[in-house]
């Protein structure tokens, strides 16, 4: 039976051709017998073959632009026709804009929310009826420390993750009667080149490049700080992938699962520190904060 938690399950992973999605796929291939449906944007499908990932009995490789409703429906229909249901959905595909609030245009905000929030929720809605019918399912969504706390110059990215967190929390209550478990895996800084793939908005690119921009020091300070933190952290895509697998295998997984040391640290800090003091403390720890705003090289 497809929904038997002890049997071979069908696991759908979005954004599986690189980064954390690829690490999750490799970990599940090595440590489980599950059937994996690995997706990537159509333009990224060529990445799989050099990685040694090919279509076969255990692996389905399928193109999926998560923002395309027809592609989402077609893929889930194909999986359900073959196996009855998606037993485990891992919402991993994501997009990250680096920008202060004032530098985000409406189309850039929509793109951020579409990839990180609207699309995974639509894919979740699409797989739920078959999960309910078999009375079993797992929805694991890759959130972020940015979904529990916001960081300057990552405003709309945090907005998309905050939205994910709220929707999945409601979903946790809604689908438990059918034996469906919902989890948010929250990585913090990971030792990878992920920050180099962050997109700048049109205005944030100008702000980062020009000292005359009022927010130039925000970008000039936060960029190197984040890059250095990612280089020094002991957390890796592989360690987060192990957390995803353990969450998937637990009988009663938690709703929120911190996946790195800093995620656990900030979760604890939020619990024990009064909120007003918490925000002042974090503000005081921002890199070169005295150079931000008035007194910097701005006009």
Image (spheres, rainbow, N blue to C red):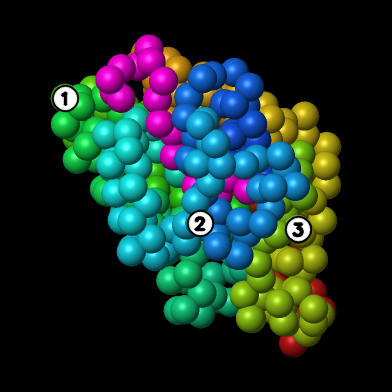
Residue 99 vs 126, above or below: the answer is below
Q: Residue at x 47, y 61 (%)?
A: 65
Point out the tag, 3 or 1, that comes first from the N-terminus: 1
Q: Is residue 75 magenta?
A: no
Q: Position of residue 272 (x, y in %)?
A: 50, 26
Q: Position of residue 42 (x, y in %)?
A: 55, 62
- Do residues under tags 1 and 2 come within 8 Å of each other at their CB atoms? no
The magenta stretch spans which residues? 1-17
Point out the tag, 3 or 2, that comes first from the N-terminus: 2
Which residue bears the numbered disc 1?
177
Q: Count residues near mark 2 (Cα–Cα under 10 Å), then give few for <14, some for 14-19, many for 20+.
A: some
Which residue bears the numbered disc 2?
63
Task: Between residue 160 and residue 297, name the one nearer to us.
Answer: 160
Task: Between residue 116 and residue 285, name the one nearer to us.
Answer: 116
Q: Quadrant of the N terminus?
A: top left
Which residue bears the numbered disc 3?
196
Specify whether residue 94 is in view.
no
């Amino acid at each position: 039976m497809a929904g038997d938690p002890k049997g071979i399950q069908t696991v759908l992973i979005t954004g599986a051709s690189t980064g954390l999605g690829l690490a999750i796929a490799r970990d599940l291939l090595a440590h489980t017998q599950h059937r994996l449906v690995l997706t990537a944007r159509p333009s990224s499908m060529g990445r799989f073959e050099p990685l040694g990932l090919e279509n076969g009995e255990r692996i389905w490789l399928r193109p999926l632009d998560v923002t395309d409703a027809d592609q989402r429906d077609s893929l889930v229909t194909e999986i359900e026709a073959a196996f009855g249901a998606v037993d485990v959905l891992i919402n991993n595909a994501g997009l990250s804009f680096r920008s202060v609030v004032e530098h985000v245009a409406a189309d850039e905000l929509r793109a951020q929310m579409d990839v990180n929030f609207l699309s995974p929720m639509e894919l979740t809605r699409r797989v739920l009826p078959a999960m309910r019918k078999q009375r079993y399912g797992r929805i694991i969504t890759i959130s972020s420390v940015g979904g529990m706390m916001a960081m300057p110059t990552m405003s709309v990215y945090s907005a998309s993750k905050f939205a994910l967190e709220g929707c999945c929390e409601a979903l946790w209550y809604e689908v438990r009667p059918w034996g469906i478990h919902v989890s948010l895996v929250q990585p913090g800084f990971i030792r990878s080149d992920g920050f180099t793939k962050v997109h700048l908005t049109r205005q944030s690119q100008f702000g980062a490049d020009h000292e005359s921009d009022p927010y130039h020091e925000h970008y000039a300070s936060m960029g190197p700080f984040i890059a250095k933190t990612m280089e020094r952290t002991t957390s890796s895509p592989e360690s987060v992938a192990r957390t995803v697998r353990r969450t998937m295998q637990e009988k009663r997984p938690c709703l929120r699962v911190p996946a790195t040391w800093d995620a656990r640290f900030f979760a604890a800090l939020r619990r024990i520190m009064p909120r007003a003091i918490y925000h002042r403390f974090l503000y005081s720890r921002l890199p070169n904060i005295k150079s931000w705003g008035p007194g910097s090289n701005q006009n």
